[in-house]
Image (cartoon, helix red, strand yellow):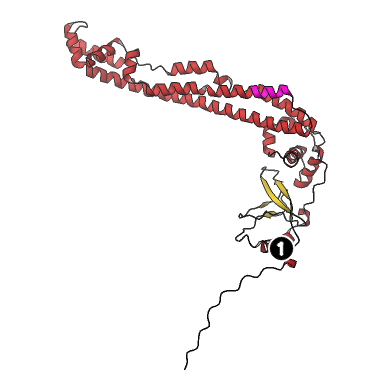
Amino acid sequence: MPREKRAKARPAPAPQVIATEELPPWRTVEKIRFWCPLCGMVADEDRLDGSPYPVKVKRHVFGGKLPGGAGFMRYLPVQDESQPRRIMARLAELAKELPARLTLAEYEEEKTFAGWCREARRRFGLERDYDVVLHGLTLALTEQAGFDVTPGELDALFHNPLADATPEDTYADLAAGMARALSERAKHLPYYMSLDETLAVATAADLAQIPVPFLAVEAEVAGALKKEKIRRGTKKYREWMRENAEKIVSIAREEFERAKAWRLAEAKARLREWQEDAGRAANYREILERALDIAVEIHVLAEKKIPAALLAEVTQAGEALQKAAGNAAIVERAVGKLEEKTFEEYVQERGTPLVKEAWEALQG
């Protein structure tokens, strides 16, 4: 019987493209930034016209509760960016599962601080006035002024003036309160006095000293001379010194190395304290500069010029902190010199007469 011919394998058909009429007529019309009232996290999304589901197509998956705990927002994983229609169809299915209260309407409030507070209360479901003030100001700075800031940062930098503010205040009220708070920050400079230049010089001079009394050498030599009944200054003493100079110098060197190690450990501990204070001073300077940037933006919203006196105060405080932080380098250089100090240098500078005598006898 003739063998039947096998049918040739055919390639799988190409995936069908979803018809255009089945897709929702969505298009990106604006960016929306979500703020978490609790942790201050931010999520930037594309606003799709006519869709209650905010989404931005990207290669990551994210799941989390929307502000107020209602529903979830999600990034769909995109394996093939050439198939946006399938992605949009999937979004349409997800949108049907969301409650109607997640529908995001266009922001129509007037661009005043009170208007942003009303928007924050509506958008995030806030109840406390302080939370409303905090998030209302955040919305004003980010969406109206285009200045990137978080509610947590505003709370950390301007807690007192914002705690006294109300949702009915104006930008001018906020600007005045922030100016007073920033002025107080500029006058109170922590870690400045502990980084005084005179104190740094005194600390460096103290750390440069290595107290080595060479008591072990003195005791060793005194015992040997007494045992052999040798008097200092005699010919026999000079001969004895030449014979024992190497041993005496060895004992003195060991005593010096022990004292240097102890002094170096103490010096490094004190240097760490200086460096930590210098780091805190530099951080406080950055806080002042950041607070000034925020205060400037608030004054711009209030259509006011920031006071020249306040600007001078913050600038001078920043320069003072920068100079104070640099004083830690004086102590650091002293510790470096201490590490490089050798036994030979110490003998020439601060050696006792006995150690110098033994050193000279060994050299020559």
Question: Left of 1 or right of it: where is 100?
Answer: right
Residue 132 on image: x %, y %:
76, 40
The secondary element bearing badge 1 is classed as helix
- Of residue 2 and residue 262, the one placed in the foreground of this image is 2
**Which residue is at a point 68% across and 22% down the rendered structure image?**
312
Question: Left of 246 or right of it: where is 126?
Answer: right
Q: Is residue 277 above or below residue 155?
A: above
Q: Is residue 261 magenta?
A: no
To which quarter of the image does residue 319 belong?
top right
On-image quarter of the C terminus: top left
Amino acid marked by disc 1: Glu
Magenta-colored span = 304-316
Residue 49 on image: x %, y %:
76, 55
To which quarter of the image does residue 258 belong?
top left
Residue 130 on image: x %, y %:
75, 37
> Which residue is disc 1 drawn over?
93
**Which residue is at a point 67% across and 64% down the rendered structure image?**
86
Q: Is residue 312 magenta?
A: yes
Residue 354 visible here: yes
Question: Left of 298 or right of it: where is 285?
Answer: left
- Of residue 137 and residue 298, the one placed in the foreground of this image is 298
Q: Is residue 45 above or below residue 331?
A: below
Magenta segment, principal secondary structure? helix
- Of residue 223 and residue 292, the one placed in the foreground of this image is 292
- Of residue 136 and residue 215, the one placed in the foreground of this image is 136
